[in-house]
């Protein structure tokens, strides 16, 4: 969608529990996950596209076409907290720790811990 190719050999998928230092089998699983995601993505978008076309006409472009034609992408990400990955000039990271500065400044020592929305709690250690 962004025009940036995927690199499953060292960029873990969003729903995978791998780091950027994957074993051979983790890379294979990451590549398969990417392929499955690319296969099912059009089916996931179809319902939304149907709603748009019902409301805005049958000539409404597909979501993939709209996304790939965007001049800028604002992404809720913090580059210092992400795995190393290639990016493009049109992808702007606007998320980050600065949004929590009011809460973090309430105490002299604060730890902010965020696992995002796709963290698997059963993979976390008990202690």
Image: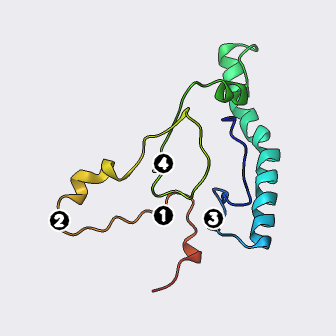
Whether tag 4 and tag 3 are in contact, CB under 8 A, the answer is no
Q: Nearer the viewer, mark 4 or mark 2?
A: 4
Image quarter in which the N terminus is found: top right
The residue under label 1 is 115
Q: Residue at x 42, y 46 (%)?
A: 95
Mark 2 secondary-structure assignment: loop
Q: CA distance from mark 1 to mark 4?
A: 12 Å
Mark 4 secondary-structure assignment: loop
Q: Residues within 10 Å of mark 1 (few under 14, many from 20)?
A: few
Q: Residues within 10 Å of mark 4 (few under 14, many from 20)?
A: some
Mark 3 secondary-structure assignment: loop
Looking at this view, is 43 or 30 the one in front? 30
On residue 63, which mark appears? none
Whether tag 3 and tag 1 are in contact, CB under 8 A, the answer is no
State which tag comes first along the sequence, 2 or 1.
2
The residue under label 2 is 107
On residue 20, which mark appears? 3
Q: Nearer the viewer, mark 4 or mark 3?
A: 3
72 left or right of 67 in image: left
Q: CA distance from mark 4 to mark 3?
A: 17 Å
Q: CA distance from mark 3 to mark 1?
A: 16 Å
The correct choice, above or below, for 126 with respect to 119 in the image is below
Q: CA distance from mark 2 to mark 1?
A: 22 Å
The colour scheme used here is rainbow
State which tag comes first along the sequence, 3 or 1.
3
89 left or right of 113 in image: right
Image quarter in which the C terminus is found: bottom left
The residue under label 4 is 77
Whether tag 1 and tag 4 are in contact, CB under 8 A, the answer is no
């Amino acid at each position: 969608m962004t025009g940036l190719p995927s690199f499953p050999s060292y960029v873990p998928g969003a729903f995978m529990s791998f780091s950027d230092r994957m074993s051979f089998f983790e890379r294979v699983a990451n590549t398969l996950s990417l392929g499955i995601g690319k296969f099912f993505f059009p089916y996931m978008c179809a319902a939304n596209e149907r709603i748009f076309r019902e409301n805005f006409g049958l000539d409404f472009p597909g979501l993939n076409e709209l996304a790939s034609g965007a001049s800028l992408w604002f992404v809720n990400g913090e580059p210092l907290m992400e795995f190393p990955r290639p990016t493009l000039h049109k992808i702007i990271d606007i998320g980050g720790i600065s949004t929590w500065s009011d809460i973090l400044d309430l105490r002299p020592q604060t730890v902010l811990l965020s696992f995002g929305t796709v963290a698997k709690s059963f993979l976390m250690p008990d202690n």
